[in-house]
Amino acid sequence: MNILPLIDQLSDPDERERVFAADDLGVSNEPAAIGPLIARLLLEESRAVREMIMLALRRIESEVVLEQAVQLLASDDPFVRNEMGALLQARGEKSIPWLVRVQNHADPDVRKLAIDAASEIPSPLVSGMLATALADPDPNVVITAVEYAGLRQCSELRAQIEALAAVAVEPMLLLACNEVLTVLRRAGSSASGPAATEIF
């Protein structure tokens, strides 16, 4: 499929034409459409066109989409950041290696967005990401990782969270650790045998 006319159409003065072009480029599933779509996304002012571009990127199966998405977690545009996080989350376990790569990003907001995106992916690999985030130098990233460990009931991270709680000086971090440890201990207790009330 020749996508060059569609790429040109992304710059059409008519908003509807840009929407149609983005839609057709997504249907094409051509990796060559990714760069032009992202370039237009970063320039585009129309919400309708931006949303169609995001839909188009979700349709294109190439891993180049994931590579670009993790880079755009550092965008200054909240729409772009949030949509790229949602795209990565929607791709599931395929996104994990790309999200792991940005866990050493210089911007703590990007590191936090990486675990936000991974948090609802049903994969055991997310536990490794959370373990890394628990050792992050930024307290907000650590607190977020602690909270996700509790939500996912990552009992394998209990010792690491206990060690954090023992040295925590940030009140919010200490509170998060204590709350999550309570959850993990209860989960561990429930898994180890019948509840005490069952013996009466």
Image (cartoon, rainbow, N blue to C red):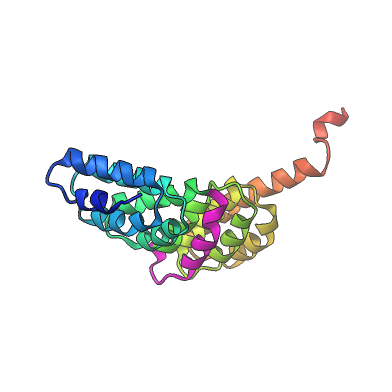
Indicate left or right for 30 with 185 as reference: left
Residue at image position (48%, 48%) is: 89
The image shows residue 189 at horizontal and vertical percentages of 76, 44
The image shows residue 165 at horizontal and vertical percentages of 59, 61
Indicate left or right for 171 with 193 as reference: left
Question: In the image shown, does 127 or 31 lie closer to the viewer?
Answer: 31
The image shows residue 131 at horizontal and vertical percentages of 60, 63
User: Is residue 107 one of those drawn in magenta?
Assistant: yes
Which residue appears farthest toward the left when viewing the image?
Answer: 13
The image shows residue 164 at horizontal and vertical percentages of 59, 64
Q: What segment is highlighted magenta in the picture?
A: 92-109
Please say if 58 is above or below 137.
above
The kind of secondary structure the magenta stretch mainly shows is helix
Residue at image position (78%, 43%) is: 191
Question: In the image shown, does 83 or 7 lie closer to the viewer?
Answer: 7
The quadrant of the picture occupied by the C terminus is top right
